Amino acid sequence: MSSIPSIRIHKASQLAYVRINGRDRYLGPAGTAAVFEKYAQVLHELAPACDRPRRGARSLRSVSVAELAHRYLASIIEKVGRSHKLAYESKYVAAALIRQHGSHRVDEFGPLAMRRVRDRLRADGKSRPWVNRLMAGIRRCFKWGVAEELVTADRLAALKAVDGLRAGEAPDAPPRMAASPPAVEACLRHLEGMGDAGAVRLIRFLRSTGCRPCEACSASWGEFGLESDPPTFRPRHHKTARLGIERVVPLNRDAVQAVRPGLVLPRDGDPVFVNTKGRPFTPNSLLLAIRRAIRATGCADWSPYGLRHLAATRALAATGCEAAAAALLGHTPRSTIIQRYSRDRLELATRAARALEGAA
């Protein structure tokens, strides 16, 4: 086999399949997550015998939107893994493309088709930020296609002409709220009673550091410097790693105490936070553990990311300094996202004004 098998869609059954050596291998209903996983598995199995298409070996007209979406998703999963946020979003991007235009060719997908996808998502009741994120994901998909010589550059340029939804054109997502401290404590007590020490340690670590859940879940012992002054956590995998920015998280006493119970002659590559089966946590598995605890206790709803929000609001309240809170959370110097956590910006401005009293 000299080329990557194309994704095809059986029109009568709407099942996605690939043809390998004259035999059809069905992957599942077109546009579903199962198809994405199985297609990535097929490419992995064929990797030794399946070379990438030579430059110019295939006509752009022979590439369907479905094939472009599936191959883009497979490349994302190979690059960042299945549990990464980008892979999660890319699944929805691929599904949105295949749902309406999977059987179309890439040279038939233009601004009008892009707008139809946008309007369908809006009609489905999706929030404005989510629709705009998927639209940006579609552009990333076609940009990847340009780099792979599956899409022409003018096609990508045309798609950039489609604007995202503006305020009022679709419902905005509710603001992300900090986790309720009493609810967190209730869940911690329940998890302790269930013997899930790993989830308890991980939740306490997130509450004490404001780390992103994906940073903590993927943490290994080699990333910790518990004997340094101050103790630090330097995640290798984080949001700004691609920009060459190092992420250094100072650890307070609560964070160190959350980490140390798992310190039993570990190797540098061993995961720090593992579940009751000894497997590393993922953001999704942590969320499921929290959801079960919420149902059992009847406390207010919250999510792992709510712990990051809680840490941010507490840091802002204690320091009155957005720059300090942004440094703790790992935001870039020019990021303004920290302002989302500033519930009382007048109080911050008042502190700044008082600092200027009597200045010469």
Image: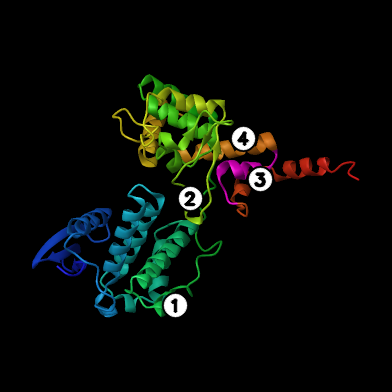
Q: Position of residue 24 (x, y in %)?
A: 11, 64
| Vertical relation: 111 (above or below) 240 | below
Q: Position of residue 356 (x, y in %)?
A: 84, 43
Q: Label 4 neighbourhood size at 10 Å, few (<14), some (14-19), many (20+)? A: some
In the image shown, does 43 or 163 lie closer to the viewer?
A: 43
Q: Amino acid at mark 2?
A: Lys
* Sooner in the amino-acid sequence: mark 3 or mark 4: 4
Q: Give the Cα separation between the discs numbered 4 and 1.
A: 45 Å
| Residue ID for mark 2 | 239
| Residue ID for mark 1 | 158
The label on residue 314 is: 4
| Vertical relation: 193 (above or below) 268 | above
Q: Give the Cα separation between the discs numbered 3 and 1.
A: 39 Å
* Sooner in the amino-acid sequence: mark 3 or mark 1: 1
The label on residue 89 is: none
Q: Label 3 neighbourhood size at 10 Å, few (<14), some (14-19), many (20+)? A: some
| Range shown magenta | 320-332
Q: Position of residue 106 (x, y in %)?
A: 32, 75
Q: Give the Cα separation between the discs numbered 2 and 4.
A: 22 Å
Residue 64: name its quadrant. Answer: bottom left
Residue sticking out furthest to the left: 22
